[in-house]
Amino acid sequence: MSTIPTFELDLFSELPEMLTTGYFYYPDHSPHGESSFDAFIYDGITREVLVLQVIVDGSANLEESSKAYSEQLAGEKYHCQVVVEDILPHAQNKHDDQRRVSWHSLTHSMFSTISWPLLGATVLGLTVSVSNAQGAASQWCDSITDICFQRYYDEELNMGWGYLFPPATSASGEFVGLFTAPVSAGWIGNSLGGGMRSNPLVIGWVDSNHTALVTIRRTERMDSPGRLQGPQITLLGTSGANGTHQRIVYRCQNCTVWTGGSGGITTQLGYAAHGSTKPTDVTNADSTIPQHSIAGQHAFDVSAARSDSYSTFLEQLVAAPALRPPLGDAGTPTATAAESGTTGNPVACANAPNPSFALKTGTGWVATAVLGSLTTPRGIALDSQGNLLVIERGKGLTGHRLDSDGCVLSSRVIIEDENLNHGLDVNGNRLVASSSDIAWSWDYDPNALTASNRRVLVTGMDNPGHNTRTLHISRQNPNYLIVSVGSNGNIDEASIRTDSGTAQIRVFDMTSLPADGASYTDETYGRVMGYGLRNDVGITEDRAGNIHSVENSMDNAYRIVNGERRDIHTDNPAEKIYNLGSPASPSSFFGGYPVCYTVWEPKDFSNGDSRKQAGDWFVQDPSNSTYNDAWCDTYAGKPTVLLPPHTAPLDLKFGVKNGDNNVYAALHGSWNRNPPQVCTRPSFLSNFIWDLGLVD
């Protein structure tokens, strides 16, 4: 192994988030001898794994037994050096025979100081600390109960997440939580471990009678969470809704420590909500939950949330009545503005719900709600007859006939399949859709709104990172299917290779595929149009038949300058659009990921760093002798358009009317920026085949 320069860090004062969100992995046998062992540190927030070699100072008889291994290390208080060899996503899934123990349960007695390396020639990136909070909880006193909580509040959303813990002397493992949101919100919830996966998720909502429900869930993947056994969740008094707001007050027992994920409540909590769509069955606490429309994380101090009066407050909440809306003259609950207001748009669809949030448009544009009460809608398309097709995650594909104003006349389920989760396209009588793992085609009748003769096209696409697939049927070459698969985490090292099957876009000739479909990485059938594309969810085609994609770039970006690690994630890197060329002659375009990223804000590259302009390449550690800025200039293909960081574009379309030379991008927004990104004019680095107008 090559020598890598190191610098000293005090583990406990400078890396607290990693200690409290990680797991420590090691195999039973070390290939490096008795004085070393391999380790994996899993970061539950960024979902990355550092693959390490730990070298023990001094002789040690490291026994093969995992238990004896950890006990001996803990007892001897060894001083260790950690040399980073590699970084892999989800290494804990690569070796099922590896045993794991809590990283922090070993650390306090094992290490006093660790030498963390700067990146060497074999390393693509390094994440040694986690700080993706968008704000912090602070003290807030509830006007209804006069109980003070530690609460995180989002003023723009008018939503709050409050917490009250028993005194430190208590070993009860419980707390009281409080959610508040506008009455029109679909649901509101949290993650007790910060990230969504492998952590307890508390979710609450009110039904049509303003009665509150609460549930505790968990998921190992980025999909709909199931009921979690073990913790006990109890709805408390003052839960319900008044004329304007809903509130969920709950007691969570056996909820502070768990196996997997972050391992317990630490210094960060997650929050999530859906602004308008409620669970499928609002009267059932086990109902399917639509995917969140907003989510993020915030800093949290458990000690500040503790109260010596916890037991008294708990008794008060247990005895308190439910919250109810005020009664109108007829003795019925008074409707809120969100429930009874009008859209104010020139065209309003009579059967559509009122939007939960104000719809703001540019001059000359109108936004109108046309359809509601959907089950996690994800992919949409219009067929040749102008019918609206919608992938509803957990349900299947639904079809909706529209009138001349775009309002829905009738609806029906076309394909009933809970596995369909995003990918959708239709061209004439051919319809394609996908799960996280498989892409299918159907014979489609737009007049009858029916699909038949399902055929498997592409398989082997599943990964636990970005689990949606984007499908596009080429309009110039209608036998070609373009398929995008995202990265297997924030930094997916393996994706630098074309055979990885992640962070890339491939094209398949549907007329030549085997009867049982082709594996995504089978180069006999799937030719690489582009790779090194972190998560290109939006795909579109210009009038010349060229394919363009829009990328969701990395989170938590940093830059190492003269040994100093600088956080630059707020304004870098840019999201970007790529021109991948014709699917008839794919060129294996390399977009730079997971090494090369694009500058959006040049001022982050100063004070000893090389000067940059918007659109320049940068790596996180320019001292790397192989993967540096110059390497990116040589090998990475330039994007054509830059979009602001953390706007998270999810779709891309060219104008269809004569004279409309615009490109339109749908921007989702990201948890990884505070304040949230404001839409600005994109930067154009070169012209497309035809001129593009700018859309604010």
Image: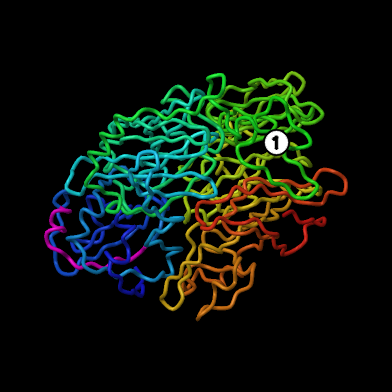
- In the rendered image, the quadrant that contains the C terminus is bottom right
Residue 142 on image: x %, y %: 38, 43
The answer to whether 210 is drawn above or below residue 423 in the figure is above
Q: Is residue 75 magenta?
A: yes
Q: Answer with left or right where residue 231 lies relative to residue 129.
A: left
Q: How is the image coloured?
A: rainbow
Q: Residue furthest bottom?
A: 608
Q: Residue furthest front?
A: 329
Q: In the image shown, does 360 or 573 lie closer to the viewer?
A: 360
The answer to whether 384 is drawn above or below residue 139 in the figure is above
The answer to whether any part of residue 99 appears in the image is yes
Could you classify mark 1 by the number of other residues whose Cα lies within 10 Å: few (under 14), some (14-19), or many (20 or more)?
Answer: some
At label 1, the amino acid type is Thr
Which element is circle 1 on?
loop
Q: Residue furthest right?
A: 658
Q: In the image shown, does 518 or 222 lie closer to the viewer?
A: 222
The answer to whether 497 is drawn above or below residue 473 in the figure is below
Look at the image and give the residue range highlighted in magenta.
69-85
Q: Answer with left or right where residue 90 lies relative to residue 255.
A: right
The answer to whether 603 is drawn above or below residue 681 in the figure is below
Q: In the image shown, does 86 or 166 lie closer to the viewer?
A: 166
- The residue lying at 55 percent from left, 25 percent from top is 395
Q: In the image shown, does 270 or 144 lie closer to the viewer?
A: 144
Residue under label 1, please give it.
343
Q: Quadrant of residue 657?
A: top right
Q: Is residue 424 magenta?
A: no
Q: Answer with left or right where residue 105 lies relative to residue 594.
A: left
- In the rendered image, the quadrant that contains the N terminus is bottom left
Q: Quadrant of residue 579?
A: bottom right
Residue 284 on image: x %, y %: 43, 22
